[in-house]
Amino acid sequence: MNKNDIFEIEITGTTDEGDGVGRAEGMAVFVPYALVGEVVSVIIVKVMKSFAYGKLLEVVKPSNFRIKAECEYFYKCGGCRFWNVEYEQELEFKRKHVEDCINRIGKINIDVPKTIGCESNKGYRNKGQFPVTDDGIGIYAQHSHRVIDVEKCIIQGEENPAVLSAVRDWMNECGVEPYNEEKHSGCVRHIYTRCGESGVMVCIVTRTECVPHGERLVEILRERVERLSGVLHNYNEKRTNVVLGKRFRTLWGEDYLVDSIGHCRFKLSPLSFYQVNNAQTKVLYDKVAEFAELSGNEVVWDLYCGIGTIGQYLAKDVKKLVGIEVVPQAIENAKENARLNGIENAEYYCGTAEELAPKLKGEKPDTVILDPPRKGCEESLLKTVAKTKAKKIVYVSCKPSTLARDLRILEDLGYKTVKVQPVDMFPRTHHVECCVLLCRT
């Protein structure tokens, strides 16, 4: 097999990222936008030792579940994966993916129920990150740092088109240059937005220490963005793929947002971790509460607590809440949010759970909440949790493969995986959130 060879292949499987998988000349071929059951014509674009990547040329025999993509950028953009398939099939793909990871990686045989779908697959994101280059302002193309210029991303909040338009006009009017990654020159690197009940926060990320004509930027944004509550500047001078630098300053308005999840309100700083889909976050947290089945007499540890969202959502039903988080600013936010919500039964500690758990005085936890980043939990942390002999662990995960690995470790440490529930927090993308209940055997 060589680059530019053309084959007609049947798609028999799907990768973790939602690409179709077929075979040609004995090799697996990965084909973006091809669906299981389809016969497609592909051109080979890259050949590896035991597999190849193909580009879809023609759908010879379409799937019964194929639909016309609603997003005009779908076949160019690297963000979404499933605008070309009926939503029920997307939910089934995510269910199967979770079940396969737990069975194959975790060596745990458990039936995974249907993924809980989202009422709307448009406009659900409350956070946006838009790179700015000579190519335009928008979203990265698949597996690339080439930017697709977009006027509107349909999974983003309704305020974002006005923000992008305002920044474009400001740059054109004032001669502000976009960032050039190769030369590490120019000014504007990213537009970063967050939307909440209290308004819209816009942050301009620049390579330069100041924002040229910043007053004019604020003026245009205030004219165009109805719910604008704050304009911030983030200074990121490093050669890096990390979007935000460490230095923020306020150009106008507030440097925070306030938002609600169910009965709780949360104050968000620009760097605060916060789930991007408000409606589904309540669904997820309700599932956590259902799995935890709290009576009001339990001590609950909320590890990787961030700004305190999950623990504070449960706080009214627990005797004592202990939150642990390694990021100092997040812990300060968690304490502030506890005051905002009138929660008096919570304590927060800054550091790693491995270090802090053995030092905590008082009662051991009855229930432990785990909500780690995509890389999952450190094995040392899981061993620390197991040593507490907590009756229940509720694990919230955004990556099925690392979840499955950690479930295997916890099972070997004396816990049994009892319930699994996928929740679609990110419609039309390949990502899926999961809530798992483990009980001590």
Image (cartoon, rainbow, N blue to C red):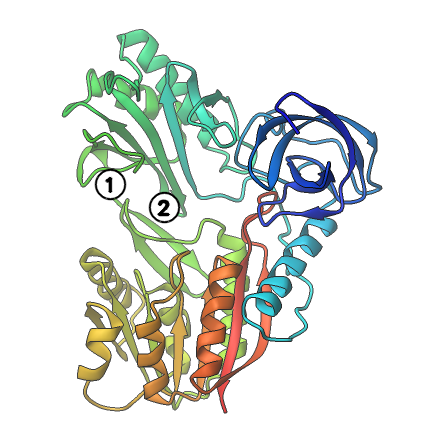
Is 6 left or right of 192, judged from the image as shown? Answer: right
- Please, what is the three-letter code of the amino acid marked with disc 1? Glu
Task: Look at the picture and state if 359 lies above or below 178.
Answer: below
Is 203 left or right of 148, judged from the image as shown? Answer: left
Task: Look at the picture and state if 161 lies above or below 399.
Answer: above
**Residue 185 position in % (x across, y down):** 23, 17
Using the image as rendered, state which of residue 84 and residue 172 is in the foreground: 84
Q: Are marks 2 and 1 in contact (CB under 8 Å)?
A: yes
User: Residue at image x 41%, y 48%?
Assistant: 197
Q: Quadrant of the N terminus?
A: top right
**Residue 187 position in % (x across, y down):** 24, 19
Looking at the rendered structure, the secondary structure element under dot 1 is loop
Task: Look at the picture and state if 311 lies above or below 11.
Answer: below
Residue topped by disc 1: 254
Is 185 left or right of 192, judged from the image as shown? Answer: left
User: Residue at image x 61%, y 69%?
Assistant: 103
Using the image as rendered, state which of residue 97 and residue 297 is in the foreground: 97
Is 359 left or right of 439, judged from the image as shown? Answer: left
Count every numbered label the image shows and give the total.
Answer: 2
**Residue 278 position in % (x across, y down):** 48, 53
Q: Can you see residue 319?
A: no
Residue topped by disc 2: 198
Looking at the rendered structure, the secondary structure element under dot 2 is loop
Q: CA distance from mark 2 to mark 1?
A: 10 Å
**Residue 420 position in % (x across, y down):** 59, 71
Using the image as rendered, state which of residue 226 and residue 356 is in the foreground: 356
Q: Earlier in the sequence, mark 2 or mark 1?
A: 2
